[in-house]
Image (tube, grey):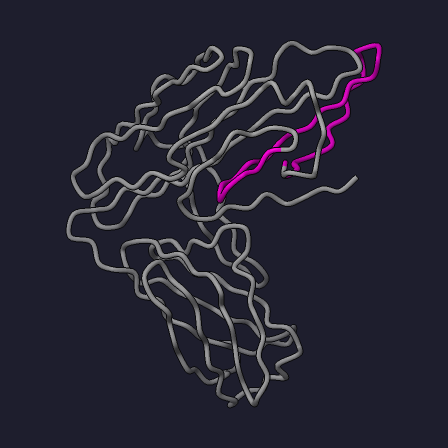
Amino acid sequence: MVIFRPFERGAGTLVALKAHGLVQRSLVALRVTIEDRSGGRRVLIGMVLLCSWAIAAPRAAAQTLAVSPVGVQFAPGQVSAMVTLANRGDMATSFQVRVMAWHQTADRVVVTGSLQPSAAGIIASPPLGTIGPGQTQTIRLLCIRPPVSRESVYRLIIDQLPPPASPGRVRLVLRMSLPVFAEPQGGTAPTVTWSVFSTSKGTMLEARNTGTRHVSLTDIRLASAGRTQAIGAGQLPYLLAGATRRWRIGPGLRLAVGMPVNITASTDSRIVLRQVTVVAAP
């Protein structure tokens, strides 16, 4: 069995999800539980990405949930927003909605956003519900704690609750994780500072956002001494306000302290070009 890591990209549209359907620019993670014929033992396979060829599950195909938009941006002073869930299947489906605070930390290998319970900065209503076939449900988001000096960031977690279990059937539980940003009054644009440093365990690329808003980083490339290397931005391309991300640079560039490195990256609105010099780790 192939297990995929979930991924996320920017704004887009989540189209109808079927066993042989397509997912356009959105996070779709599934928790798969298999029961034996007696209905007793359950084996958790893990989180997998459902795509057009990954899984064929006729029973699960009838459970179809779509969401729009796939990201929410609160402008300064804005207090409410809406997300629409659509049941494109042929049977009723139940859902659960939660808002989680989103933090980003850096370590010597990767940076990932971690989810923590929200401190009630944003609330979602209704938190639970059932949508009939062909029907829609509006989820209202209310910002009850406006950001003061830095953009507040959250994840809107939408779980499609499974139907009653049937022995010998595969149950697919859809989970969608949408980014939610609340921009402060008078916020500053994201400013990314780049550096490359050498350690005893390898060479690292670091990006630090000193602005008060997030930025998306994609298509990161390094060039030095006639050699180039692409750096994967990972599952989440966001660099949050005040956060730092680090990526390990492969040995193909053969970097050493004192060598110049040209960095190019795509952000939300432009191409970034920077030249830095490899330094020893502080």
Q: Nearer the viewer, residue 12 or 124?
A: 12
Residue 32 falls within the magenta-colored stretch:
yes
Residue 191 falls within the magenta-colored stretch:
no
Q: Which residues are magenta?
A: 21-50
Rendered image quadrant of residue 161:
top right
Residue 240 percent location from the top left of the image: 38, 53
Query: Residue at (18%, 43%) from the top-left corner?
Result: 76
Q: Residue 270 vs residue 135: left or right? A: left
Total labels: the figure holds: 0
Query: Residue at (38%, 62%) from the top-left corner?
Result: 267
Q: Nearer the viewer, residue 214 or 28?
A: 28
Residue 167 percent location from the top left of the image: 78, 11
Residue 3 percent location from the top left of the image: 72, 42
Is 112 located above or below residue 178 in the figure?
below
Rendered image quadrant of residue 272:
bottom left
Q: Residue 110 vs residue 180: left or right? A: right
Q: Residue 61 vs residue 176: left or right? A: right
Is 77 located above or below residue 56 in the figure?
below
Residue 71 percent location from the top left of the image: 38, 39
Query: Residue at (75%, 42%) from the top-left corner?
Result: 2
Is 239 located above or below residue 271 in the figure?
above
Image quadrant occupied by the N terminus:
top right
